[in-house]
Amino acid sequence: MKFLKTYLILAYGLGGLLPLDSAHAQKQYGPGVTDTEIKIGQTMPYSGPVTAVAAIGHAHAAYFKMINEQGGINGRKLTLLSVDDGYNPAKTVEQTRKLVEQEGVLLMFGSPGTGPQTSVQKYLNAQRVPQLFITASTLKLVDPTKFPWTMVFPPSQRAEVAPLAQYLLAHRATAKIGVLYQNDDFGKGFLQALKEALADKVQPTIVAEASYEVSDPSIDSQIIALRGAGADTLFNFSTPKFGSFAIRKVYDMGWQPLHFVSVPSASIAATLAPAGLDKSVGLLSAGFLKDPSAPEWQDDPATKEWLAWMKRYYPEGDVAEWLNVYGYTSAQALVHVLQRCGDKLTRENVMRVAASLTDLELPMLLPGIRLNTSPIDFYPIRQTVLRRFDGKAWVRLADTEPGTHPTGAAPAQRMR
């Protein structure tokens, strides 16, 4: 497998550090780094209500295994300490402290969950430990001024909701919207982003909102209430398990709303298949990664390379699970950052490089989507594309192209 291309990184500074070009001048190590090893920490929901998301951790481990077989990062092997937090913020705090204080990891990487990651954000920033490329998109987590050690990987909730709202305005301007959301910062952030997108519009209108707890055994009553309120459009801001519940209930009731699902619930393996692929036909969702199941990518070299990687390094993984594509891609982003750090593998330099990405193309991102960051914008992915599920795969709508949407930080320029 080919190594990632190395792109020029602008020399933005954090706290007066030396230019990036000096990273190779002499060895400077932070905790968890030696001449032969880079130690990385991670919490994952290997148990609890969102175990489907743990596929990301398995994909990360598989990708790092490949990198180590190829000689590591500038000769240093990657050691990923990925531990279970059960999607429980209290457990996340406990496990994160152990990884930082006992295991001495260089950084925390890719950990998912708005609640879990919010619970350790202040601690990691106080300790000056990178909380890097975490799998969360809530608006509250990203604030480079207040939390300069926290950077997410997925697009912001505003960037995800924007193309959905634009489609609604173009195709169903008088829609009556029902919103299902998780009762935490994850779900509330999506609801806020939707309201912002429709703020200056007389129509469409939100006629009903219904929330659920991650401990709820069912969401049937919420779906019934949304339909009863007269909604003809459903925004489903949920995690995979509850997204599956909602899709199945909507279909079984004979309700036929225009149905939007958030990216976390767009998983074919974890959400749509359990609900029923036939019951999922016509769903709309934003996307930023290639769907290996889609016919348009069957002859794509990057997709073929990903499938070969899955077969060799992660044979137990489901090739229909987009979270495995996500894990592969976010791992590539971290490897790129660590490679650019050279022999200056300090926590400060890791964050400075991460905050200086310029038009970084990764093979499984949709065409036209690139990673860009700066010291004032910690959303690497600013673009999304609207897709429809056809019963087998997510297919890009013919009249859409990658568009830059609000990130909650500095305005971003449209990529070409």
Image (cartoon, rainbow, N blue to C red):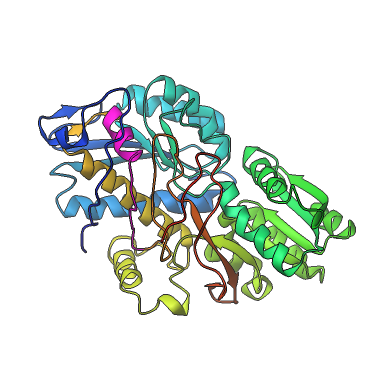
Residue 4 located left or right of residue 154: left
Q: Where does the magenta region start and end?
A: 348-363
Is residue 210 visible from the viewing direction of this image? yes
Q: In the rendered image, which quarter is residue 277 located in? A: bottom right
Residue under the image location 54 percent in, 31 percent down: 118
- The residue nearer to you, when weighing 226 against 342, is 342
Q: Position of residue 53 (x, y in %)?
A: 50, 51
Residue 104 vs 318, above or below: the answer is above
Q: Position of residue 364 (x, y in %)?
A: 38, 63
Instruction: Give the residue furthest to the left.
Output: 25
Residue 181 vs 398, above or below: the answer is above
Q: In the rendered image, which quarter is residue 297 located in? A: bottom left
Residue 86 located left or right of residue 371: right
Q: Quadrant of the N terminus?
A: bottom left
Q: Position of residue 218 (x, y in %)?
A: 74, 52
Instruction: Give the residue furthest to the top.
Output: 126
Residue under the image location 76 percent in, 65 percent down: 250
Q: Position of residue 78 (x, y in %)?
A: 24, 43
- The residue nearer to you, when weighing 389 against 62, is 389
Residue under the image location 19 percent in, 45 percent down: 73
- The residue nearer to you, when weighing 3 against 165, is 165
Is residue 218 visible from the viewing direction of this image? no
Residue 316 located left or right of residue 52: left
- The residue nearer to you, when weighing 282 against 193, is 193
Q: How many marks?
A: 0
Q: Quadrant of the C terminus?
A: bottom left
Residue 368 is inside the magenta segment: no
